[in-house]
Image: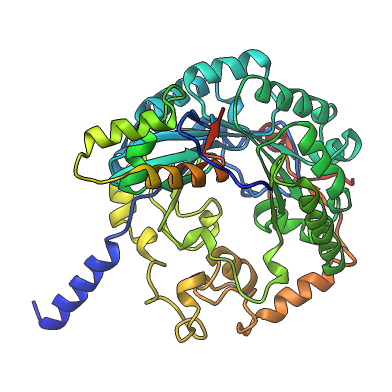
Amino acid sequence: MTSQAVTEALKKDTKTLVGPPLWLLAELTYDCPLHCPYCSNPTQLSETKNELTTEQWQKVFSEARDMGAVQLGFSGGEPLLRKDLEALVKQARDLGFYTNLITSGIGLTEKRIAKLKKAGLDHIQISFQGADPELNDAIAGRGNAYQQKFNMAKSVKAQGYPMVLNFVLSKQNLDQIEAIMRLSCELEADYVELATAQYYGWAYENRDHLLPSREQLVEAERIVNEFRDQQDGRGPHFIFVTPDYFETRPKACMNGWGSTFLTVTPDGSALPCHSAKMLPLTFPNVKDKSINDIWQQDFSFDYFRGDDWMPQPCKGCDEKEKDFGGCRCQAFMMTGDMHKTDPVCSKSEDHHLIQEAIASATSPSNPIVMRVNQKAMKHAENTQLNITRIKI
Amino acid sequence: MSTLTITPTMTPSLNRMFRFQWEKAQDCFVLLFPEGMVKLNGGAGEIMQLIDGQKNVQEIIDVLHAKFPDAGNLATDVNEFITTAIEKKWLYHD
């Protein structure tokens, strides 16, 4: 071996000595009873028949826990559609995971909340689309969704769970922010995520209908701060997340590629984030490889670790340790090159794309596209696009 | 907000929002909560292990003195940790 090869090998070794995937997100199914146009799921969904079995999921949990994974999110789609959810929760809890159910609340009953509690579920997060039935159900694309969520949130608290409410904010509901905060207090939420939509999957398609104006955001932030001041340490802890499109530096996406997060999709693909499947990289599948091999050895997980891959202006930037060059998916979606600096960064030569997106959102030219589920998709006439168009 | 004073007869208990456990991979005790984790240092871990909603502050100090006879006066450390933990809402008190 030449000395250069030894140096390269050592470098490789150092690079792969990474901490454990502390946060495991198990996307149990892409099936969902709601049709939210901000959904971050891929617009091309695989079929439910390819979903991992109970045993395959249990192997994933066991291997990830052995490596030191500690937070486990049961997500989707709608994870309640999996009949083995209780069995999966029980095994995960027995392994020592902190178990989080991330749900729309549709399909939840008082009985199921109790059964999940018995299985050892630690926490439930319920998503809301608005502060009243009219807007909530229009965005969710389902009647009575609001009432169901409201009732289940009451029951989740009554049964002693910590509860997080998640409101995905867009220009469609941002003006309700004060009502949303009042609703969160009424429901006795512990944490509330007031999170503006991130533009991936269906949300990217619908960006013009979702991305608020700067003025709308400034006003929302003022209301949030005013509300917090009146709380005096009581009530929910509100977390307000503004869209990165209005920032001049990118987000530290996933806390750095392959550093903390591991997502497993319904069909077993292992990804460094839930959107990464769109990238021109080949990702491993948990059916073929162990979690340890995937995390420590796989080419795709190592690909954007460190800064060897970085182009300028990232490479010479003194903030590269802070934001890791931003989001690879965003760079790819907007510029066609996953290696480029996230266009959110004002130093990026592609930053104009962000400015243009903000401008374009002031007058959307296409109708909004509601997310469709797999059954509907099978019958969709336009199989190439797999979408239906519904105006709200 | 009023300043919190820890008294020897106060009985702290864990906020049910948090779960306390040993994490082998982190080599420390941790507090787990929705989508998050706090790593506790050695001293904090020793104190947290004794918080069961039954023992009061003085009893916790006594157990620690028995376990670490050479550690000197631990009352200040215990009071400081419990104050912080109550402010962070990890603990409740009666």
Say above or below: B27 vs A225.
above
At horizontal 80% and vertical 32% (from top left) the residue drawn is A186
At horizontal 66% and vertical 24% (from top left) the residue drawn is A156
Q: Is A238 or A336 nearer to us in this picture?
A: A238
Q: How many marks?
A: 0
Q: Position of residue A352 (x, y in %)?
A: 72, 81
Camera sees residue A354:
yes
Say above or below: A191 vs A327.
above
Say above or below: A37 vs A103.
below
At horizontal 61% and vertical 23% (from top left) the residue drawn is A160
Q: Position of residue A261 (x, y in %)?
A: 45, 51
Q: Is A268 or A236 nearer to us in this picture?
A: A236
Residue A360: name its quadrant.
bottom right
Position of residue A221 in the picture relative to residue B65 (left or right): right
Q: Position of residue A250 (x, y in %)?
A: 60, 71
Quarter of the picture containing the C terminus of chain B is top right
Residue A101: name its quadrant.
top right
Q: Is A241 or A371 nearer to us in this picture?
A: A241
Q: Residue furthest top?
A: A111
Q: Position of residue A287 (x, y in %)?
A: 36, 39
Colouring used for the render: rainbow
Q: Is A127 or A117 nearer to us in this picture?
A: A117
Camera sees residue A170:
no
At horizontal 64% and vertical 70% (from top left) the residue drawn is A334
Q: Residue furthest left?
A: A1
Position of residue B40 in the picture relative to residue A230 (left or right): left
